[in-house]
Amino acid sequence: MPEPEHELEKLLGGFAADTLAPEEREKLFRAALQDQQLFNALADEQALKELLTDPAVRRRVLQSLAQRGTGPSPSWRDWFARPAGLAWAGGLAAGVFAVIFGLKVYQDGLHQAAGPAATEEVRPTTPSPPPQAAPPVQAPLKDTEPKASKSAPLPETAAKDAVASASNTREKAAASRPPQAPHSSADATEKRESSRQKESQKRDATVGTLGKSAEQPAPAAPTSELDRLLLAEEKTEQPDLSVSARALFLGQPPASGIASRPQGDEVESVPKTDRFALAQKAPQRQPVLKPLALRYTFVAGEKGESPGPVTLTVESNQEAYLQIWTRAGDALPELVLPAKETGRISLKTVAGQRQEIKVSQENDRVIVRLSRVPFGPITRQEAVMAGRSAPNQVTESASTAQEQATYVANPDPSASELVIEIPLSTYPSR
Amino acid sequence: MDRDDMLTALRERIVAFAALRVSRDHAEDLAQDVLAVLYDKYPHVVELIELVPLAFQVLRYKMLDAHRKALRRGEYNQESVDDLALPASGGSPETQLDQKQRVERLLAAMAQLGERCRELFRWKMEGKSFPEIQTLMGQTSVNTIYTWDLRCRKQLLSLMGGSWE
């Protein structure tokens, strides 16, 4: 009976090492005479057999085998070569992947759950769209108060119902907070409005003391909360003409409520508003910027002399970057400060530092640009557009015995640039 | 199976084996040379377990001889006979160098084997049979040892470049 091929192949291993038993040898050689492939394999093994027959070679091989393997971590490679090792590695990798994926899904779920809550807190602070009729407006606003939450649901949309229910849930969660903390954003809105009214009254008083633009009639008291919100929004959009440019430049308390309020007041107001809403925290943490302002004066040549250059002196109220352009007629503006020779396009100046420049009277306009950040490179065509003043800038000329200067300021502290276009034909001459 | 039957079978296998490496005519000549040696020099070898390994050994020598002759005759690179050195009576330096290089390759390949293969080869080099190795390696079946040996030899052959030569 012929031996299975795989059985004979196993015996092949003992041929070269000459470790086969006589029965195995006879079985192997008899099969080799019948099987060409086995014969070829044995003939190939003859080279190794011959090598291992030499006692010296055999001894060296034994010594080599007795030493430790020099391969790169063979046990580790063997472990991975086994099916069980591969299965373990695959299972471990799948487990790690599942944990990471699960954590990501969980975090996404948390983010989604936190999203609507954040929206709720902001929603009461933003003015709602104008209602169709005045009377129904006040009722929903009052209904948003938690005191009335047990009453009938809001007649708005289902989303507002969800907001109200979520707000109640948040109230329950915040039950452990100090008792002085407000219980709803509606309360916060009420308190913010009252504080705004107080600030507005203070501002009016300040304007009165300055004696400028006090003739403007104070706006009528808002009849409803919505009206107050709309009025407050309009105030922020329109320039406050009651602001004194000189006061802004000198750092005096400005008339505008949004203008440079002293730092101490800001710090004191934080605890008050901090209790109202979390959404109010972020803007109040931002540093209060000083409104950009500058003062400029012109000094012309002596009277009777031919029109010569005019000396322009510019001084900023804070550390800023300055550019002065001149323009003649419809020609493109030309940068005169910093000078071309310096190779720079922004001149850094600090508060109180006066920059003087002589301007030829051939030019009919001077454009002064003051910025909190260095100017970027622009073309002369772009400088035409960049030389336009902002609509809410205020200008004030001071002509006293001590000084004769013009103050320009932007009451909005968030404004990053101040641009003044000065016609040279109207400059004051001594 | 008597000796003549064994030699007949051997001739057929030798021709087929040699034909894979040299031309058919050369393979016939090689088989004839091997059988001539077995007839003339080893007439007393009649046992299968002795005759077949002897045939493998003679076949290998004859093939190496044929290779050397072809080299000497300039079949691979045409050189003047006058430039070739006379063969020494003992092992030529080329043969010694060839064997030395083969041993070095074998040792380097064995050093890269896994621990199990090294242990298995060590037992084999010490002359242990497969059933003895089975006991020494603590295996319940000798087939496990056969399988390991087969894989280890394949790995060793691969590490040596696919040939024992």
Image: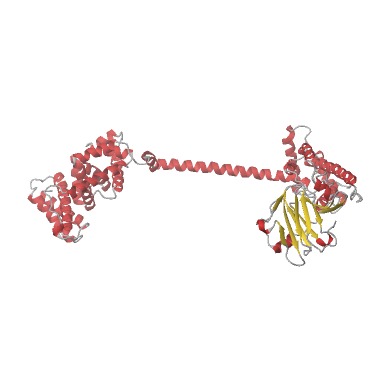
User: For this view, does A159 lie left or right of residue A31?
Assistant: right
Question: Can you give x and y, in whole percent of width and height, for residue B66 in the image?
Answer: 16, 55
Q: Residue A167's quadrant in the figure?
A: top right
Q: Say which residue appears at 28% left-offset and 35% top-offset.
A: A66
Q: Say which residue appears at 28% left-offset and 38% top-offset.
A: A65
Front residue of A421/A37: it is A421
Question: Can you give x and y, in whole percent of width and height, for residue A155 in the image?
Answer: 80, 48
Q: How many marks?
A: 0
Front residue of B44/B109: it is B109
User: For this view, does A299 lie left or right of residue A215?
Assistant: left
> In the rendered view of the protein, which quadrant contains the C terminus of chain A?
bottom right
Asked whether residue A258 appears in the rendered view, the answer is: no
Question: Can you give x and y, in whole percent of width and height, for residue A32 in the image?
Answer: 20, 49
Front residue of B48/A420: it is A420
Up-down relation of residue A243 to residue A55 (above or below) = below
Of all residues, the one furthest to the bottom in this rendering is: A330
Q: How is the image coloured?
A: secondary structure
Asked whether residue A25 appears in the rendered view, the answer is: yes
Question: Can you give x and y, in whole percent of width and height, for residue A214 in the image?
Answer: 90, 49
Up-down relation of residue A19 to residue A373 (above or below) = above
User: For this view, does A140 lie left or right of residue A6?
Assistant: right
